Amino acid sequence: MTLFHTESILETINMIKLHHLDIRTVTLALSLRDCSDSDVKKVGEKIYNKIIKYAKNLNKYADELEAEYSIPIINRRIAVTPISFVGESCNEYDYVYLAKVLDEAAKEVGVNFIGGFGAMVEKGFTRGDLALVESIPEALRVTERICSSINVASSKAGINMDAVLKMSEIVKETARLTKEKDGIGAAKLVCFCNAPQDNPFMAGAFHGIGEPECALNVGVSGPGVVSAAVASMPKDADLGALANKIKQIAFKITTTGELIGREMAQRLKVPFGVIDLSLAPTPTPGDSVAGIFQAMGLEHAGAHGTTAALAMLNDAVKKGGIMASSHVGGLSGAFIPVSEDAGMIEATKCGYLTFDKLEAMTSVCSVGLDMICIPGDTPSDTIAGIIADEMAIGMINKKTTAVRVIPVPDKKVGDMAVYGGLLGEAPIISVNRLSSSGFVRRGGRVPAPIHSLNN
């Protein structure tokens, strides 16, 4: 029995020290529905005070848990009620002001991102929704920590093509207004189909309308751990054996996250929410989802078989993680952001991963087209077509999909966009130059699929 515990402890130490196991984020999710008022200044005051009240010790307790358990907690974040809901009660809309308030509160409590500057418009816009969406470029220009997400489609509602076209223009303008930083504003803006209400990861985190007053959601990660575990298997191990190994590792990763999440929630005196099982890579070598594909036997990410490998990986991670926690939520699976994964960056530089291959992979991954840099002169109608395609994959397959593409101003295919830190860097990749205009400008709503009628 003692030997078992010793081996487990040593294995966990190696996972942390050698293979980049960490708690990727502890995200305090907070309802701001009680902050509504007819006076936007009063709304701002209520929002600021509530965030300070609940999040003032977030960093302190995260630091304490890091020291006590020797497990890195990389990001500390906040997710709030979609701000379109909160600001819509004002006599005069000033969502840029509310963005500044959120940013100031986030700065005061020391978090790196605050999510929820968004709206749910899969069936159409309210006046407040439209005002918020139109404020996004300026809001992301004048703030540092704000992340914005707009849900434009769902399996129940279909695809709001008016919102898709609008968001394509917003993405272009946001990138233009932050061109001195390679369009970084667009890196904090995402369009969703079937957006989860309890996602702790940015840029898509928000506190959904069906959520409690507050909750502590945790995002665990560990692509390096999974890669090392797969690489340790015999070369002739079959895929069933690889899947079982991934499940075992996912169980251990999730158990670590569950421990930290419950301890953190208890100290903050808020309910524990969910564990998000996602394998979230970083630009650090060895912390790559693409590296897992190579450990599985593919020459590189992008080879034929990559989509099948990703499907198996995603499924095994979920099966292993679900046994370690009764409260799994968020996105859960494997992320494939180009700029945030060293292996994906290399694959796109070498031409192994094309835009079309990335889109195919999104049919089985956790999110979608994530952190992909495209030429700055890409027409907004083409971006609308990209968003529509990805929304269709999510709608038909009843899964979450997202688009976070960055039309990098003044850069062309082969140039690099550099953001630094967690956002990393990425080569500009080509997109199909055929026009989408006649289709995307028809407007209206793509009807929900037949399987939406499942009551």
Image: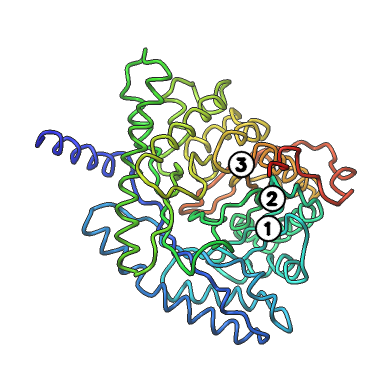
**Residue pushed farthest top?**
236
Q: Amino acid at mark 2?
A: Pro
Circles 2 and 3: CB distance less than 8 Å?
no
In-front residue for pair 233/283: 233
User: Quarter-wise, where is residue 363 in the image?
Assistant: top right
- Tell me the distance, in whole angstroms, between the alpha carbons under discs 1 and 2: 6 Å
Q: Which residue is mark 3?
A: 399
Q: Of the residues under marks 2 and 3, which one precedes in the sequence? A: 3
Question: CA gap, disc 1 to disc 3?
Answer: 28 Å
* Neighbours of disc 3 within 10 Å: few (<14), some (14-19), many (20+): many
Left/right placement of residue 167 relative to residue 45 reads right
Q: Residues within 10 Å of mark 2 (few under 14, many from 20)?
A: many
Mark 2 residue element: strand
Question: In the rendered image, which quarter contains the N terminus?
Answer: top left
For mark 3, give the secondary structure: loop
Q: Are marks 1 and 2 in contact (CB under 8 Å)?
A: yes
Up the image or down, 257 lies above or below 41; here it is above
What separation in Å lies between label 2 and label 3 (alpha carbons)? 26 Å
Label 1 or label 2, whichever comes before in sequence order: 1
Q: Quadrant of the C terminus?
A: top right
Please provide percent x and percent y for residue 297: 44, 20
Residue 59: x %, y % from top left: 35, 67
Residue identifier under label 1: 175
User: Which residue corresponds to mark 2?
Assistant: 407
Q: What amino acid is at disc 3? A: Lys
Residue depicted at 67% across the width and 74% down the height: 95
Judged by depth in the image, the label closer to the viewer, 1 or 3, is 3
